[in-house]
Image: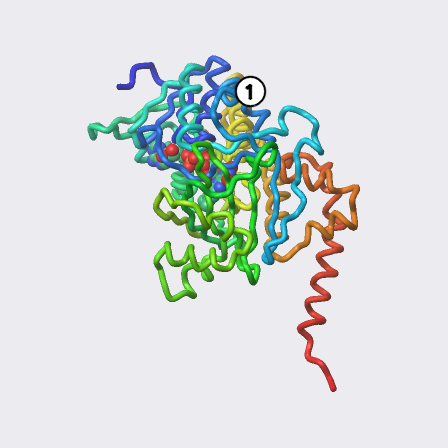
Amino acid sequence: MIQSANPQVIVIGGGPSGATTATLIAQKGYRVQLFEREKFPRYHIGESLIPETYWVLERLNMLPKMRASGFVHKHSVQFVTSKGKLSEPFYFHDNKPHECSQTWQVYRQEFDQMMLDNAREHGVEVHEETRVLDVLFEGNRAVGVKIVDKSGVEREIRAEVVVDAAGQSCLIQDRFNLREWDPVLKKAAVWTYWEGAYRDTGKDEGATIVMQTEGKHGWFWYIPLHDDRISVGVVAPYDYLFVNRETKDLEKIYFEEVAKCPGLQPRIENAKRVAPFRAAKEYSYRSKEVAGDGWVLVGDAFGFLDPLYSSGVLLALQSGARAADAICEGLATGDTSAAQLGKWGPEFVEGMERMRRLVCEYYDGFSFGRFVQRHPQLKGHLTDLLIGDLFTDKVDDVIPPMNALRAEMDAARAAAAAPTVD
Ligand SMILES: Cc1cc2nc3c(=O)[nH]c(=O)nc-3n(C[C@H](O)[C@H](O)[C@H](O)COP(=O)(O)OP(=O)(O)OC[C@H]3O[C@@H](n4cnc5c(N)ncnc54)[C@H](O)[C@@H]3O)c2cc1C
């Protein structure tokens, strides 16, 4: 039952981006209503956090709750080649000796519940099992939403600002045809959960392991969660995984790829599968706009980047925090125009682009090991990018040498492909 007077801000969706935006606006004393179609806890993929989430979690007063949780501590990321060779771990603490360098592997149903409860504690009026059917517009300005609650009752609610945090449902993006699919990252994923699979010990217990498959078509994530579970999923081009293959059966596809991953096989050989197979297809995209008059997009409702470096929740938290600051400033000055609400957009997109570059390089066979051997002084900047310290141009020092190595690799590839003359 909706009790309060008209809110100043409406947030659609109670995932990490919606909870972040709503909490930070409520912290400033504004009236916020959040509508979530599901009853929490609900399942969601996206379990591995990266260190730079720390700073937004700190603003949300979530750190004591994270420390008290049973979530596995993550200190590093490690890569395994298609031949099964393990890289040195990238320990986040080596680069940034601060508490923030320890992050967490989370069950999203638990983490998202904690975030939503935290939003309530900060004064957000949260309505679960309430679906937003439509965003209401007068001219180009968003003025509210139409909702339906679990008993089927529909209502219209008005607000000065509407935040679309509805994840891949992308209500506003689709309404204005703003979605641009990534032309390169046309990937898909299949995953499940294992019990009794191999776990490292000590500092390495919570490492995310990224394991390439033979032929370098794809890679597996290996994410140790609590209760002895490990999340294990394969990512590869959509056509390779689903189209150019005889079977459409997820289990068969998964095990065909396990058979091509020497790094993974020994880790799960004595384990028991404890969940169904799930899949996600062609998920990298971005909106042409981050905001309009009276509306803002955050998290996946703005854009999603391939999960290779586990950046999704970071981007959800970062966009949520940046949008919240712009909204509060706009409410204080009476300016809820597109320019005010979206002022954080260009810097955010630049940060996303830096991560995207690293993702594309990995898929194009870039050797991080060779890069670091050649430019040891840049290992820190590379680690900065991997921990999610994306929103600063100081890390751009890696770009010219990366371009040079890329050009060398392309030239070698072209030479190898050129016909030989006898
Ligand atoms: C295969 C894969 C692996 C991933 N791995 C990682 C990882 O390891 N680490 C990481 O950080 N990220 C990962 N991600 C990304 C991560 O899942 C997302 O980026 C993150 O969940 C985005 O948060 P969000 O709050 O924007 O959206 P969501 O978490 O999707 O939340 C949106 C919420 O809106 C609600 N909603 C939708 N429509 C409506 C409506 N009409 N009315 C009301 N409510 C609505 C939904 O029920 C949902 O609760 C992965 C993604 C994929 C596809």
User: Could you tell me the amino acid type at mark 1?
Assistant: Arg
234 or 8, which is in the foreground? 234
- Give the left or right position of residue 6, taking residue 321 as reference: left
Seen in the image, is 138 located left or right of residue 314?
left
| Quarter of the figure with residue 101 | top right
Q: Quadrant of residue 346?
A: top right
Locate the C terminus by quadrant: bottom right
Asked if residue 128 shows in the view, the reply is yes
Direction from residue 289 to residue 98 in the image, left or right: right
Q: Which residue position is annotated with label 1?
A: 59
Query: Which quarter of the figure is the N terminus placed in?
Result: top left
Label 1: how many Cα within 10 Å (few below 14, some 14–19, many 20+): some
Whole-percent x and y of residue 208? 56, 40
Query: Looking at the image, is 15 positioned above or below residue 3?
Result: below
Q: Looking at the image, which residue is at 68% across and 39% down?
A: 383
Camera-side residue of 313 and 291: 313
For ligand 1, which image quadrant applies?
top left
Instruction: Name the residue nearer the viewer: 246 or 20.
Output: 246
Q: List x then y, in percent, for residue 155.
A: 26, 26
Residue 161 position in % (x across, y down): 43, 26
Question: At 48% from the left edge and 59% from the top edge, which residue is drawn?
Answer: 259
The residue lying at 69 percent from left, 69 percent from top is: 414
